[in-house]
Amino acid sequence: MKTVVERWSQEKRYLFIAIVLLGMYLAPMFIMGENSHIRLHDNLDSNIAWYKVLKDNQQLFGPIDDTIAQIINGLPRNAFGTEFSGIEWLHYFLPSMTAYAISQAIVRVFAFAGMYLLLKKHFMQGEVFGAIRVFTALAFSLTPFWPSGMLSTLGHPLALYAFLNIRSRDSSYKDWLILGLLPFYSSFVLGFFFFLFAMGILWLYDGIFRKDWNGRFLGGILFMTSMYLLIEYRLVYSLVFPGEPNSREEYFSAYLSFSESVRLIFKNYVVGHTHVLTLHQYVILPLSFLALGIILWKKLWKRERRFVFLFVLNFVLSAWYAFWFYEGWDLLKERISLLNDFNFARFHFLRPLVLYLLFALSLRVLWTNGMKWRQLAKIAMIAQLFILFLGNPEVYYGKRNTPSFKEFYAQEQFEEIKAFIGKPQDSYRVASIGLHPAISQYNGFYTLDTYNNYYPLSYKHQFRKIIEAELDKNKRLENYFDNWGGRCYIFVDELGKKYDYGKNSKKQIRKLELHTEVFKEMGGEYFFSSVPILNASDNQLKLLKVFDHKDSAWRIYLYQAV
């Protein structure tokens, strides 16, 4: 008798293999727990700590005008976004690393399902293309997306599947359910604003060129947009009732010369961007040029018009991204604050969808051109999956010797510091040197420094006085703080833009110049430094104790402002 697997169709076998591979990719986080190595930038150094701060301060449902005293003597609650975000709920009810692993699984499963459904119904029908559909969907689901973005980019295929069903008047309640639920596990400003804008352009195209002003399609766009505006009510409120000036008002985004903008086009086109990494440069990009060559050679323009459109769009998105930072926008951005406050460069967040659709269509071009080309297509699929597995966080960050989750937040070490200080944590304020303040925040300390894109501008100016002398020494740090300021850190000229000096570092600070009196006026009492300060006494600082711990990535020098 044949086994169950033998009775399956070939495509179902591919699906079984894909599910196994996806499980293998996710397994390290669930098996290793807090010993896992995960992304540090815009993740461990920020978002994960923010979720815990909300939980510890019971501020998930905090009033719209409330503040969180633990950060900068009162960070606006709205800086942490909406409570109707699924990832906020995971971190509220579960330990941080457990919530993180489950979120990764949710995103990757729905990314796989969305791309598979989209390809099967709208881009690549027929049993012969089963392998392309399945393994392109798997590859898409394994891309190293920005974790706190959730389905903001990897949910685009599922949303496009639903919209194309509605557009073709072949929809069911499931498609509307997709449009209604996706906003609870994604972000409007970090992905779906740009996607919905693209859907609006598609609707206009149908109306103008096809004379089909599809009311249901428009209704779907308005419905999903309305869901986002309701869920993101805090963002809407801050736009309608802006209140006091915030740090975003000193964000200066038009700074690149023409030649620098051109270089950035090709850097983004080939390498991508940290928040939407696709790892496309090794296989997908050259494969798309090969497929384009075949199309040109065989004059397949009409048959492969979708491929040609996506090929051009891929470059256009990179060009738009790069030239958004061109200095020629300067005057316009100065006059229209929205162009600075909202990052319209993020249209390039559509690129993961575009690139992996382009990958699938490139594979199809090869697949339909004979057995030798088909073998090359199979090799390309295997190669892309291999590259993506090398990008697995445990592999990528583990081999770079970055701290594990447990080593980064060093909870036992910071408990020792807390016990040594021996006072209620809300009775004093701390700041970090050579160390991300998110670590202190995660461990319940009240910090004067922070990493947030939205906080009072008056606080930024007050905090700047502490580090004024250090900024004067280093124009790069001065520009970084003054023209952005999202990292409201104790910047030190001798440390530069590095905030994670490990316990094995030999680095020392020899000529620190802080305005300690301003620090004390703001409530500051202690500095947590990851490196020794040789002229501490010149800054009215006294070394109290050095803390070391086997499960920590850091050696903490505890200084008191005296």
Image (cartoon, grey):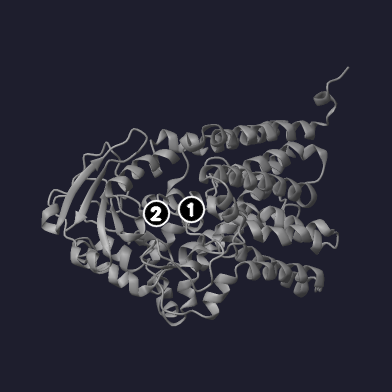
State left or right for residue 235 relative to residue 67. right
Picture mark count: 2
Q: Quadrant of the N terminus?
A: top right
Contact (Cβ within 8 Å) of mark 1 with mark 2:
yes
Q: Nearer the viewer, residue 196 or 223?
A: 223
Secondary structure of residue under mark 2: helix
Q: Name the residue beneath numbered marker 1.
A: 52
Q: Residue 179 got which mark? A: none
State left or right for residue 90 relative to residue 342. right
State left or right for residue 255 relative to residue 299. left
The image quarter containing residue 313 is bottom right
Secondary structure of residue under mark 1: helix
Is residue 449 in view from this perspective?
no
Q: Disc 1 and disc 2: Cα gap in Å?
A: 8 Å
Q: Within 10 angstroms of label 2, few (less than 14), some, or many (20 or more) residues?
A: many
- Where residue 233 appears, x then y in whole percent? 60, 71
The residue sitting at the top extreme is 1
- Where residue 128 appears, x then y in whole percent? 80, 37
Q: Nearer the viewer, residue 131 or 249?
A: 249
The image quarter containing residue 201 is bottom right
Residue plotted at (79% across, 58% down): 175
Q: Nearer the viewer, residue 421 or 267?
A: 421
Identified by mark 1, the residue type is Lys
Q: Nearer the viewer, residue 257 or 539?
A: 539
The residue sitting at the bottom extreme is 335
Relative height, residue 116 to residue 186 (above, below): above
Badge 1 or badge 2: first in the primary sequence: 1
Q: Residue 441 got which mark? A: 2
Identified by mark 2, the residue type is Gln
Residue plotted at (50% across, 58% down): 54
Is residue 306 in view from this perspective?
yes
- Where residue 530 appears, x then y in whole percent? 27, 46
